[in-house]
Amino acid sequence: MFTKVQDWAIARFINSVNSNPEVYIPDRKEADARLDLIGRLVVVRAGLIGLILGLLLFGLAFFLYENPSASGFSDVQIILILTVLSSFATAFELLFIYRDALRTAARMASILGIPKEELETVDLEHSIPHWLIHAALGAPGFKATMFGIDPLAHIGKIGHVIRKALGKVRIVVSATMFKIILRRLWARLIGRVAVRAYSMLAALPFFIFLNMLGTRSMVRDMRSRLVGHELTPKLVDHAFPEGISNISSGLFHEVYEGLNEHIQTARFMHPNQIRFLMLLPDSPPGTPQRNEEEQRRGQRFLLALSCMSGDPTRRCRTLLKAIEQNLGQDEASLVRQEIDDAIHDLTPLTRPWL
């Protein structure tokens, strides 16, 4: 099931790359304004599709509960009809949102000037289309061993068993059922009035907000993954002006071991982390011991890269808090702001880090 959805998503994305009207915008302010606009529009459309389908379901429920011509249906039959149609409506709603998000991602990629050949490369699990499709479908990142780092190294045997079992519940199905269950739970929590049609109307604003909030998070993640194509090499050059191939052994191990810990704590590898690891050379000769300056440089870079790698999980917040304490709150806030501006305002990195 998921493979078919992924194949459909890849075909949809590539078709959007070839057919979307957007062109590369070299002016960063103009490009940022265009990215902001299409990002807001996809969020609004997610809310509108939730509103339209919600009103259609409310109209159906109102007819079944209130219209005399539907008096022949029992309560069980009405609940069954509403559940089945609600399932189809929710599945269509999610399909519309995924399709719209992928089309928007293709438009963003064209505006940012990402080479077309890279957008059409789908034979690698960590290619740009796969990264964007994972973001659209709610999968955070890559979970296989890469560059000697195993994201799932610390989950244990029981964790592997649970993950394998959960993997059989595919994303679209689970998301659909989640929203259906929420709708039914809403009805149960309200009480008797909930078996009437009006409860669906009362719940409508909540689901519109849920659509818009989820889509906004999805768009921000896709934008981070796309901007990372250009930003990751610039961040590396900014953080290591001596050249990534010329960093000391202590700084190399500070960065590599810190990133390894972050990935294993998060239990997935974000595309921008993969981009950096592809640039990282083999370990230089010398002692892995690091001095205070190397620790500070490494931790500052790790904080910046983590800000480019999606919202931190609950487990990762402890690691990031420790880094921020070592750097100091003022420096940590500056780094966070610089990366946020670079992703969402396309502002270049100019403040010296040395």
Image (spheres, rainbow, N blue to C red):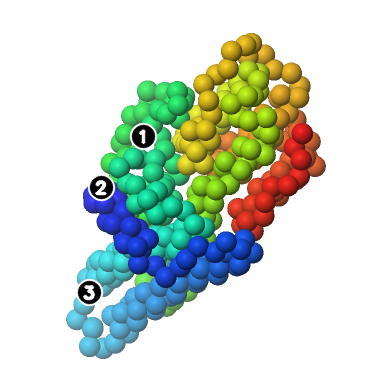
Q: Does dot 1 land on a helix, a strand or a loop? A: helix
Front: mark 3 or 1: 1
Image quadrant where residue 259 sits = top right
- Picture layout, residue 119 above or below residue 208: above
Looking at the image, which is closer to me, 42 or 276? 276
**Residue 251 can be seen in this image:** yes
- Point out which mark residue 3 bears: 2
Q: Does dot 3 land on a helix, a strand or a loop? A: loop
Looking at the image, which is closer to me, 208 or 86? 208
Image quadrant where residue 354 sits = top right
For the point 36% across and 28% down, which residue is it? 160
Q: Amino acid at mark 3?
A: Ser
Counting residues from the start of the chain, the first of labels 2 and 3 encountered is 2
Q: Does dot 2 land on a helix, a strand or a loop? A: helix
- Point out which mark residue 130 bears: none
- Picture layout, residue 328 above or below residue 74: above
> Residue beneath label 3, please?
74
For the point 58% across and 47% down, which residue is it? 231
Badge 3: few (under 14), some or many (20 or more) residues near its Cα, within 10 Å?
few
Horizontal side, residue 15 vs residue 152: left or right: left
Q: Amino acid at mark 2?
A: Thr
Image quadrant where residue 305 sits = top right
Badge 2: few (under 14), some or many (20 or more) residues near its Cα, within 10 Å?
few
> Residue beneath label 1, please?
163
Check if mark 3's residue and mark 1's residue have beta carbons within 8 Å: no
Query: Residue 12 location, x and y as percent?
Result: 31, 60
Kindly report the distance in space between the C-alpha atoms of the residues bearing marks 2 and 3: 40 Å
Query: Residue 337 location, x and y as percent?
Result: 71, 49
